[in-house]
Image: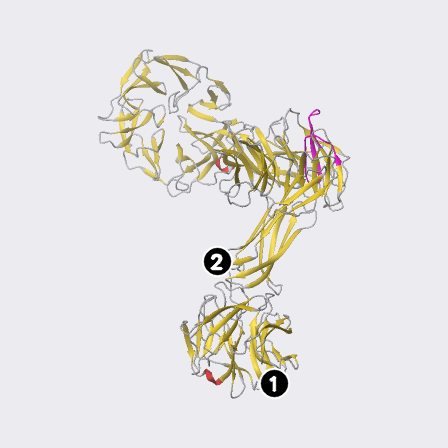
Amino acid sequence: MAVAAGTVVAIGMTSGLGPVGPSAVAAEPAPTPAHTVFQSDRYVPRGSSLISAGTQGFLRQVDGTAGFLWTRYSDGKSTLVAGLNSILGYPGYAGAGSDTVALPQAGAVELRGMADGSVRRLPLATGTYLGTYGETAVTYGESGSGGEIGDLRLHRFDADGSVVVQQVTTPPGARIRRAPLAADARTVVFAYADASSRTRLGLLSIDTGSFTQGPEVPATGVTVAVVKDRLAWYAAGQPIRIAPLDNPTAEPETRTMPGAAGSSVSSLGIVGDDVVVARDVVGTPNDSRNTSGMPLVAVPKTGQPPRTRLAHADGDLIQDPNGNLLATGGLDAGLWFVHHMLESDFERQLVKIAPEPAQIRRISLANGTLATNEADSNFAPVYVTRTVTTQGAALSPGDPVRSDRFAEGPESGAWSAGNGRSVRMMRIPDGMSVQSLAKDDAAGYFSLPSQQATVLDMTGRYAIVNGTDPVQQYVGDLGVHHDLKPIRTRPVTAASVWGHTLWTPSASAGVLTAENLPTGATSTLATGAPCVAKELQAVGRWIYWSCGPTGQAGVWDRTARKNIPVPSGEALIGDGYLVRHDKVAGKLLLIAFQDGSADETRTVGDLPGTAVNRRGVTWTVDKFGGPVAYAAEDKRIHLAPSGVPTQPVSAVEATASTLVTVGGASWSGRWLVSRPVAGWQVTVRDVNGKVVRTLSGAAPKGVIEAYWDGRTATGGHLPNGGYTWALTAAPANGQGPAFTASGPVGLRNGAPVRHDHVGILPDGIGDLLTLSGTGDFTFHGGGSGKFSGKTTGSGWSTSALAVPFGDLSGDRCNDVLIRLGTGELRAYRPGCGQPLNARTAYTSIGTGWGQYDVLTSPGDLNGDGRADLVARQKSTGDIYFYAGANDGRFSATRVRIGTNWKAYTKVLGVGDITGDGRPDLLAHDANGGLWRYEGAGNGTFKAGARVFSGWGRGYNALVGVGDITGDGRADLVARDGSGNLYRHNGTGTGTFAGGVRIGAGWQSYRLF
């Protein structure tokens, strides 16, 4: 039965391809989809050129039919016009504007009345035949060079049967171009150059023989329509213009041409008050549904929106004598008609243009991407890809996408890689190349010196190619665009690739070598095969080996570590099954082995045998848990599900970056999965487990690609430091567990965190600020729980007191408050990674700050997004809160939040040490009591809680230095009297671990 383009037919499986028993490690089988059959229509629709139209019918030429057909409006019946074998492609050569078809002859033209069956021979005594318009023939004489004509004459029968010849008087100096631009039975429109060399339209009246000067137009690119009493024309970049035929130089009516700039116009027509435009569409050149023909758009009078009459149409538009329009088109290449558009806005489908099935020259299917090599209307091979999905109880092929690359030679491809990419083999001057079908896929390419080559196996980024002249085997990496050369060149042998692993036979019978292609590391695997394998196929846990076409064959189960004997022959394996072409019986046979045995054989479908190997050419399997596909004798593509339970989804390839720089490189993760997934989700969490970003998407081609720019969903900045990501992807068929993966990621150039000053792109790791006895402020960077790198600025008084602070200027770099010996407090803005010296830009906050013996910044205490300051008054021991302001200073009014803290020898801001997101304060008394004051979120602190007793009595300095170990928890740094430096790791619960000595000789520094 006939199947239109894009239509699939689901038929019951009568060959026993039902579900089988589940494997111990495989997912439960989903209901088996039906066997799906679809016709791949030729990309270009069957051609049907419209030549002329009369009151009773029209003349056309149909691709695949010799000669020309006259088709009646009344019943759509077509008649071959005998003797009319070819025409010149301009209006009127075979007739225009009537039911008369003209057949030029030597010295005459035969006029055939297609409505009444009459035949008359009109002699042409002089001139060269141009065309027939109604019942009148026009001849011309050559005039100058460049195809210009002159001496126009009209030839017609008089009422008494005699021949009348009328000379046409043309404007003086007119240089008329030979091919008319438009015509009907009464008017022929030419382009000509007038005496001033301006290009104009010229109107030849068939009734009177007059030649009327028309409007001035550009020299090229003019499209014209003439119907009844109106003339319409269009030139690129101009509006559509309409003028009366009897006054063509009058001020024309104008209408705006719809569509994008740069779109070309094939032809114009007029129906009622509408101008109809066949317009090429700019964009989506690879989408065959959008580029199969061109839209036919009706442009009403100015002020009314244009409307699409046909989404896809041929460029030929023909007017009939009654002012109606004929056009060929339809929804897509598989459903085209000749349409009769009437002035009444009624439209009739006169005759269907049958789709033509494409010739399938090669078929490949991997991870749902079906790639075919097909013949188009010119019988030149082209590449087409489709996405095959499971829709309910049927396998569904998606819309065809036509590549703009063309096939060359019998071994030209296409081959589908399983990651959405498909490739071809292409000849280049010094050999061959593997090349992606997508022109914008720069990485999908590598070259080799052999003069002939074919792809042996391909999975994801890696392809194995066997070449001749010279005879070599090549392995190429299509995932990295480097030197465009193979990464391995070796003698031809059995080989297969799955993920990053290349499988080849060793010199010992039954032993295989597995090579990790990125690292070069190798290992061996004993399969028990009695030979050095002549053929290998690797699919997940399964490795198929063969001793040759008539030798033994088997499948090694890498999970169960056992060998499963299978029949020899022309075979391909999928996930848990093998398909063999029985050439004698002319059938494709499926053998399931996922349960550890291969004792059940079922018929997939009929496929006649050939003398040559046709696997991967006319039939294939989707080794990514998918169906069998084959191009049958019925010129249609068959998709047959295996009915075999698939293994759980796993990663065939996986890469994930570990760093994201806001405004720079995004975090990216890419996974090629072993079978299709329905969709995926990535959650990003901070060190406290809070979800800060959720990403999601689809993976229709077996590839999950996730990107994170380091921001929140609303574009907000997140603190620099460490985060984790977790991926979840559910199987597309709903069977088996979800695929999961996770890992760490560091964030740079986000919101600054406490005490992070070192590095142009701060890393979220706290830094220690010191003041030396010579007046040098130094930032000590680290990251492994110690301090190593230094950034030093000079020129300071040794009496200066520093407060490492948050971002005061909005540059996402932490700043520093400095109190001078005079009591003036300044806000210095050194910038990320820059030294703090006396010349650093600053803003004076004010004087009188010498009254405080403690200045510290725990962070943002009131939740307004700005860092705040805590100060202790020396005279009273009272604690004051200074809220950060928009101008980089502090609010005018201080708030007392504690009284008489004189008992504490040290008071220090430490950031959030409890994990509640609010910054906290520590206080240390003379008896060694360490007290925690948790931030309340409103600029105050909760009541103090003792953390330790008798702790740190030997310490003379304590600094809440932030996270210096990279675990996301705020740590403490302490110094004893001998100058030893200690780290106390934060636990995230408000306490600290025991001290770890991380340095010595720090006694000469003041620590901040």
Q: Nearer the viewer, residue 861 or 324?
A: 861
Q: Which residues are magenta?
A: 565-589
- Marking on residue 512: none
Q: Which residue is mark 2?
A: 663
How far across and down, in percent of the image, does residue 684 sit?
Answer: 59, 59
Left or right of residue 276: residue 874? right
- Give the crowd class for mark 2: few <14, some 14-19, many >=20 residues within 10 Å: few
Tell me which amino acid carries mark 1.
Ala
* Residue found at the very far bottom of the displayed protein: 875
- The amino acid type found where label 2 is placed reads Gly
Residue 691, image x, y percentages: 60, 61
Observer-nearest of 295 and 868:
868
Q: Residue at x 68, y 43 (%)?
A: 540
Q: Is residue 334 visible?
A: no
On the rendered image, what quadrant is the N terminus found in?
Answer: top right
Q: Are marks 1 and 2 in contact (CB under 8 Å)?
A: no
Residue 285 appears anywhere in the view: yes
The reply, left or right, for residue 64 in relation to residue 942 is left
* Residue 317 location (% of width, % of height): 42, 29
The image shows residue 65, relative to residue 971, as above or below, that is above
**Does residue 124 lie above or below 799 as drawn?**
above
Q: Quadrant of residue 242?
A: top left
* Residue marked by disc 1: 926
Indicate yes or no whether the magenta region holds residue 566: yes
